[in-house]
Every structure is written in C-alpha cells, then in structure tokens.
Image (spheres, helix red, strand yellow):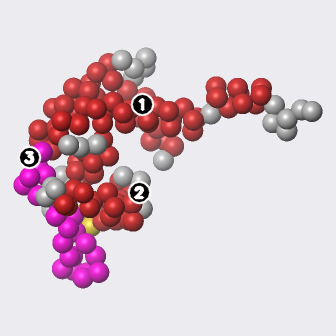
Amino acid sequence: MSKPVPFKTTLEVRDTCLCLHVQRAARALARRFDEALRPFGLTNGQFSLLMALNRPQPVPMRPVAQLLAMDRTTLTAALKPLQRDGLVAVTTDPADRRGRLLALTREGEALLARAVPVWRAVHGALEAGLPGRAEDLRAGLCALC
C-alpha cells in the first residue's frame, strides 16, 4: 500500500522549503549568539530586546513588539526577567495611563555596552564566512517581512 505523500515529496520539501531552511539557520545563529552572550547572562533574544530599547527616550511597547516581530504578551513575558535583573524599567505612559513605556536602566546600558563588542566579533565572523554578500542576504530576508 502506498503512502498518500510519497517519500520523494519529503525530499523535495527538505531540499527546497524556504521556511525550513530559514528556521534551521535561525536556530544555528541563535545557538551561536547564545553561546557568545552567555558570559553576560544574556540570550540572543534578550540582547536584541535590550538593543531595541537603546533609544534616547523611553519607548511604548507597540513599536518594540513590531520591531522584534512579537505580540505584546510575548514581549511582556520577555521583559520580566530583564526587569527583575534591573536592566529594564517599565513605567506608565503619562500621555496614556493604559500604556507602558520601556527604557534601559543604567545597569542595562552598561551591560549592553559590554556585550556589543562580542556581538560585533561574532557577527563579523559570520558575515565573513558567508558565500555571498551579507547585504544580499539581509535584503532577501527583509523582503519576506
């Protein structure tokens, strides 16, 4: 009895599926940056969140969630350990008492400043090892968003 989806289709998806290849690459990149940022007590996601908050003024949740492609509930959960560790301050928006403003604390700024050189080194090594131009890869990935 033959299967409804032949093994040949499995191989086709394995070899051509953009989603699968992007997921695999994202996981490999995440592991690499997690390892590099571990001495700072950060994951790659936390580093990205801290960097998203590195602004001259506190920022509402919505633009941060949009930048990081996450919903507000996920962002709220991601903020909790950073708040607990004193890296991020969450305050009530004086213009809209229902809203929250996010900002790095001095401790968060200092930690980010120490982590950025490591991020640059790892990122530079990754870009140097790419078979094509990093700008082309970024443009292709941005086109998917």
Q: Residue 57, how many percent across, how many down?
A: 15, 62
**Can residue 90 be seen by looking at this rendering?**
yes
Q: Nearer the viewer, residue 37 or 123?
A: 37
Q: Secondary structure at mark 1?
A: helix
Q: Nearer the viewer, residue 136 or 124?
A: 124
Q: Amino acid at mark 3?
A: Ala
Circles 3, 1 touching at the beta carbon (< 8 Å)? no
Choose top left, top right, bottom left or bottom right for residue 129: top left
Q: Residue 69, how many percent across, how many down?
A: 41, 53
Query: Magenta residues: mostly which secondary structure?
Result: strand
Task: State the residue lying farthest toward the bottom.
Answer: 97
Circles 2, 1 touching at the beta carbon (< 8 Å)? no
* Location of residue 27 with respect to 70 vertically, above or below: above
Q: Secondary structure at mark 3?
A: helix
Q: Which residue is mark 2?
A: 70
Residues rendered magenta in the picture: 88-111
Could you tell me how far apart the alpha carbons at marks 3 and 1 are, in whole angstroms? Answer: 27 Å
Please tell me which of labels 3 and 1 falls first in the chain. Answer: 1
Task: State the residue lying farthest toward the front.
Answer: 1
* Location of residue 99 with respect to 31 vertically, above or below: below
Q: Nearer the viewer, residue 38 or 143?
A: 38
Q: Amino acid at mark 1?
A: Ala
Choose top left, top right, bottom left or bottom right for residue 116: top left
Q: Amino acid at mark 2?
A: Met
Kindly identify the residue that appears in the image at 23 percent across and 48 percent down: 51
* Location of residue 99 with respect to 39 vertically, above or below: below
Q: Which residue is mark 1?
A: 28
In front: mark 2 or mark 1?
1
